[in-house]
Image (spheres, helix red, strand yellow):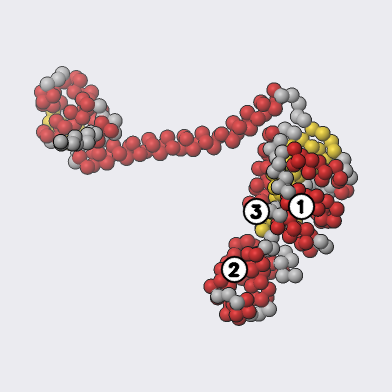
Amino acid sequence: MRSESPTVSDPLATLGLDPAQTALYTAVLRLHRATRTELAQAMDGPVDKVSRQLDDLVRLGVIDEQSGEYLARHPAAALGRLIADRLDRLAEESRRIDSALGSIRGLIRDYDVGHDYQNGAFRVEMVSGADVLYESVVGMAVQSPPMRLLTAIPDERTMADFVRKFADPWIDAQQRKLLNVRAVIPVSTLTLPGVRDQLTRLLAAGGAVRTLDRVPSWFMTAGADAAGLPALWGGNLPDHAYNFYLVRTPIVVGMLRSLFEELWGRAVPLPWGRRGEGVVQVLRLAAQGMCDDSIARQLGVSVRTVRARFADAMVQLGAQSRFHAGVEAARRGWLS
C-alpha cells in the first residue's frame, strides 16, 4: 500500500500572496521580461486587473518595472524580500506584545485600586508596643501557616531589641513551620552582642537573612494580606514606642513586597552556614598573608576549591579584586 506524500504548502501563499498574484508572478518568471499587455494575454485576463496585480507585486518587491516592462527578480531574492518583510512585521508585533506585557503591572495596580475602592476605605489600625508587634506576627502565622514574613530592620537599637527579647518566639515559629522568615538588616548590626547566635539559629530553622549598608526604614509584610508600616517612615521603632500601622490592603502589601524584593536583590548573604564558612576561612587565611597553595594545605582542600571560594566571596561582596573582597569582608565583620 503506497503512503500518501505530505502536502507541501506554497511558500508564496504562506508569505501572503493570493493565488492570482502567485500565478502572475509565475508567468513573469517564465517570460522573464514582458509588458502589461503581454502578461494579460498570458494570464487570459483583462489588462486593468493584471495591471493592479503587477503594481502589488512591484510594491512587494518580487518583480521590477523598467520602461513599461516587468522583469522577474531571482526567486531566492524575491522570497528573501517577502521573508524579511514578514519578519519585520513579526518583530513589530513582538514589540507590541512586549509593551502590552509591560503594562500589565500597571493594569494590575489599577485593578487592585478599584477592588480596594469598592471594598471601602483602607483597613488601617494603629498598634502600639513591641510585645504586640511580635506577638501579632506569631498570631497571624498560627491562623495561616506557613506565613511568609518579609521584614526590613533599619537600625541597631531595633535589632538589639529583637535579638534580646523577641527573636525566640519567631525562631520557634519558624522551627514549627508556622513562619517563613526573610529579613534585610544593616551590616553594622552583625557585631552587636547576641546577633550572630540568634541569626544562626534562625538560619538553621530555615529562615534567610541578608545585609545592606543602609536599610531605608522598618516595615514588614505578613503573607499577602497584611503589612506593618512605622508611624514615621525611616524612623526608629523604639524611639516611637513601637507605634506602627497594621494595614490590610492588597495594594499596599504588594507595594511593600516589591520594595522588599528590590532590597533583597541588592543585599549580601550572611557569611554563615557551611558554604559561607568556607568563604570566610579563605579570606581570613589570605588576610594573614597566606598564598593559595598554603591555604589549600591548611584547609585540606584543593587549590581549585580555594580559588572558587575567592570567586564566591567577590560575587557576594560585590568586589572587583581579592584585596577589595578582604577589605569589604573586614568592614562587614566577617573576619572577626
In this rendering, the count of numbered labels is 3
**How far apart are the two marked residues, 2 and 3, measured between alpha carbons?**
20 Å
**How far apart are the two marked residues, 2 and 1, measured between alpha carbons?**
30 Å
**Depth order, front residue of 234/78:** 234
- Quick check: can you spot residue 62? no
The quadrant in which residue 83 appears is: top left
Tag 3, which secondary structure? helix
Q: Amino acid at mark 1?
A: Ile
The quadrant in which residue 135 appears is: top right
Tell me: 143 left or right of 262: right
Label 3 crowd (10 A; few <14 / some 14-19 / many >=20): few
Label 2 crowd (10 A; few <14 / some 14-19 / many >=20): many
Instruction: Say if mark 2 contacts mark 3, CB within 8 Å.
Output: no
Of badges 2 and 3, the one in the foreground is: 2
Please report the residue visible at 60 percent of the width from the left and 80 percent of the height from the top.
297
**Depth order, front residue of 92/63:** 92
Residue position for label 2: 309
Residue position for label 3: 266
Please report the residue visible at 20 percent of the width from the left and 20 percent of the height from the top.
49
Q: Earlier in the sequence, mark 2 or mark 1?
A: 1
Please report the residue visible at 11 percent of the width from the left and 25 percent of the height from the top.
42
Give the numbered dot on residue 171: 1
Q: Earlier in the sequence, mark 1 or mark 3?
A: 1
**How far apart are the two marked residues, 1 and 3, measured between alpha carbons?**
25 Å
Tag 1, which secondary structure? helix
Q: What x and y, as percent, mark residue 205?
A: 71, 54
Q: Amino acid at mark 3?
A: Arg
- Quick check: can you spot residue 265? yes
User: What quarter of the picture does the C terminus occupy?
Assistant: bottom right
